[in-house]
Amino acid sequence: MTQHVTVGIDGSVQSAAAAEWAAREAHRRGLALRMIHVAGTEADALERELGGGAELPGRVAEICDGIAAAWPGLDVTCEVQPGHPAYTLAAASGRAELLVLGSRGLGGFTGLLVGSVGLRTAARSLAPVVLVRAESGRTDAPAAATSADATSADGAPADAAPGDVVVGVEGDRPCDAVLEFAFERAADLGARLRALESRPTSHDVYTTQAPVEQAEIRESLAAAEQVRLQDALARWQDKFPQVRVEVEVCPWSASRALVEASRGASLVVLGRRTARVPLTGPHLGPVVQSVLHHAHAPVAVVPHH
């Protein structure tokens, strides 16, 4: 099968935003776009019983048609698959370069912003997963109508100026898969890469015979942490010399630092270990879950060993 970006669509405003994001990414990378609607809900089952067969539901068909109209040069396919959405989309990720899903975005119901399908899929996907929230105040108009204000030479919607690509890093054990994904996305977008490491402020008291204030010691230690983080990224900066890099050792918790950094960002990139945990199976760590629920930008979850 042709290399492609896969996006799950269910007819919601969120999945329309995800489809538009996926189309832009597929066009930028020269890949095909595969749009999948998983017919696993009670409404889908009722529609099949009433003769709906494997046809795309009305709103899903509108999203597919809107994407095809907005991106005339893009190889787009739309299909219906049976099954549970999370497991079916996770299985489809094994043949994709990237899997894109919609999320409900910011709101007051803080425990349920992404939804169980998004979380379960992100925990099981074999490919990097990007969760995209609908833009604030967006209507449910077809994607073609939301992208018609500017086009590139081939008729596709033109890209806006990119925000930073933000990546969470552990400087003492950086993950190559996560950093490679983040640097590639920054290079593709022409965006700055902002690497963040969380080192919450310590209240330890440091002793020394030299006449040095505690604040000076802490500043010196923070500077050393930043140099260590820069060293951890040096190999990737050599590989992607066109990418501007900013490193920051943040005194906040990792989730708070990444959520704050997501304001105005193009993408937040996090890692997920793929090793299965006995009894619990695949899962997302607390930092990834928190960022998925509260980030202001699309979030990529990259599986790694």
Image: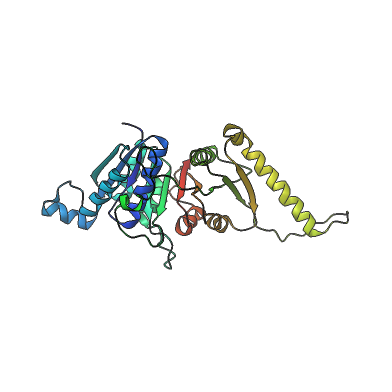
- In the image, what residue occupies the spot 39% across and 45% down? 124
The image quarter in which residue 138 lies: bottom left
Where residue 246 sits: x, y (%)?
Answer: 62, 46
Numbered disc total:
0
The image quarter in which residue 109 lies: bottom left
Query: Could you say which is closer to the camera, residue 264 or residue 39?
Result: 264
Query: Could you say which is closer to the camera, residue 301 or residue 91?
Result: 301
Where residue 199 sits: x, y (%)?
Answer: 64, 53
Q: Is residue 126 visible?
A: no
Taking the image as shown, residue 237 lies to the left or right of residue 70, namely right
The image quarter in which residue 78 lies: top left
Taking the image as shown, residue 199 lies to the left or right of residue 149, namely right
- In the image, what residue occupies the spot 69% across and 47% down? 225
Q: Is residue 176 visible?
A: yes
Where residue 160 sits: x, y (%)?
Answer: 46, 48
Which residue ends up furthest to the left in the rendered image? 51
- In the image, what residue occupies the spot 61% across and 33% down? 238
Scheme of image coloration: rainbow
- Quadrant into which the N terminus falls: top left
Vertical placement of residue 228 versus 240, above or below: below
Where residue 147 sits: x, y (%)?
Answer: 36, 50
Which residue ends up furthest to the bottom in the rendered image? 108
Taking the image as shown, residue 168 lies to the left or right of residue 61, namely right
Query: Could you say which is closer to the camera, residue 141 or residue 208?
Result: 141
